[in-house]
Image (cartoon, grey):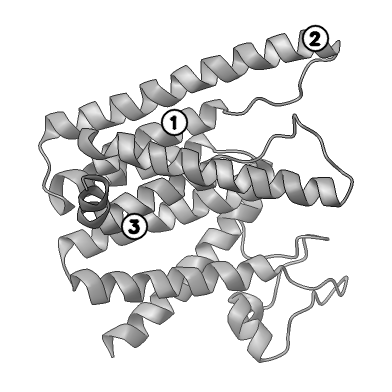
Amino acid sequence: MIQFALIVAGLFAGLIINSLADDLPQRVRPLAPHCHHCGFPYHRSQWVGLFALVVRRWRCAQCDAPMQWRRVVVEIASAAMLVYLFERFGLTVKFGLLSLLLECLLLITVIDLEHRLILYVTVFPAALIAALYSLFGAERELSKVLVGGAVGFAVVYAIYLFGWAFGAIAGRLRGQPLAEIPFGGGDVNLAGVIGLAVGWSGIVVALFIAVVCGGIGASLYLLIAFLRRRYNLFTAIPYGPFLVIGAVALLLFDSEIKNWLAR
């Protein structure tokens, strides 16, 4: 019964995430779910994408455009995440705070994948929840929480400065400035949030996982682009999702990862 309630809660959390991911990057007030082509409001039976798919109301009533598959993917991920966390931690403070934090990180990931943006309006709530989780869910000392946030911010800020310098030099050599740099200010802020969540003892490991995953992801992206004859050495990819992967790995498998690295 609890699992069913969590599935329903996860689907509605996914609904909220999808709506925010549609509207926040446009700098508009979040609205009820609407068509991403024409902006026409969806019928209430279409608010939850998975339900709309089941009842075969998958298209906009005005322009007949199909709904985004992202809606279903996010809803399923959100519901599965809540059930998994409950099975792992039970109905505890850790479960509640970690659920809120991971939902925030899911929203940040979706927006960064689609728009290459990490917005302040998503980072600030995530930072607050990360700090609360670290203090009351993971039961860390306040000093470790703050140092973790500062280290995460500082390390990625240094990478950001290096990327900015590299972009300036590469742009001068090419005779054309680069449109984007490897890390943006949003990535720096997100690293600070992750530091708050995992503490100073985990932030280096989380960043290491993010860099490894980012390297693998970038290599696969460039390989596919090369095979499709769209290769561009200076193509920027969103790095926020890889930072989130590092954070989630530490949040869920902290002891296992540290034991493995200590071998």
Q: Out of 179 and 49, give the one closest to the viewer.
A: 179
Q: Image point 22% across, 29% down: which residue?
A: 146
Q: CA distance from mark 1 to mark 3?
A: 18 Å
Q: Is residue 52 left or right of residue 101?
A: right
Nearer the viewer's eye, disc 2 or disc 3?
A: 2
Q: Amino acid at mark 1?
A: Asn
Which residue matches tag 2?
Answer: 173
Q: Nearer the viewer, residue 43 or 59?
A: 59
Nearer the observer, 43 or 65: 65
Q: Image height check: is 112 above or below 164? A: below
The label on residue 51 is none
Residue located farthest toward the front when viewing the structure as drawn: 263
Alpha carbon of mark 1 to alpha carbon of mark 2: how far? Answer: 30 Å
> What quarter of the picture does the N terminus occupy?
bottom left
From the image, tell me which residue sits under label 1. 189
Q: Is residue 24 visible?
A: no
Q: Nearer the viewer, residue 261 or 62?
A: 261
Picture coordinates of residue 66, whole percent (x, y): 80, 73
Identity of the residue drawn at 45% across and 21% down: 157
First in sequence: mark 1 or mark 2?
A: 2
Q: Which residue is mark 3?
A: 100
Expressed as whole percent of the image width and height from the top left, the position of residue 172 reads 78, 8
* Residue 205 lies in quadrant: top left
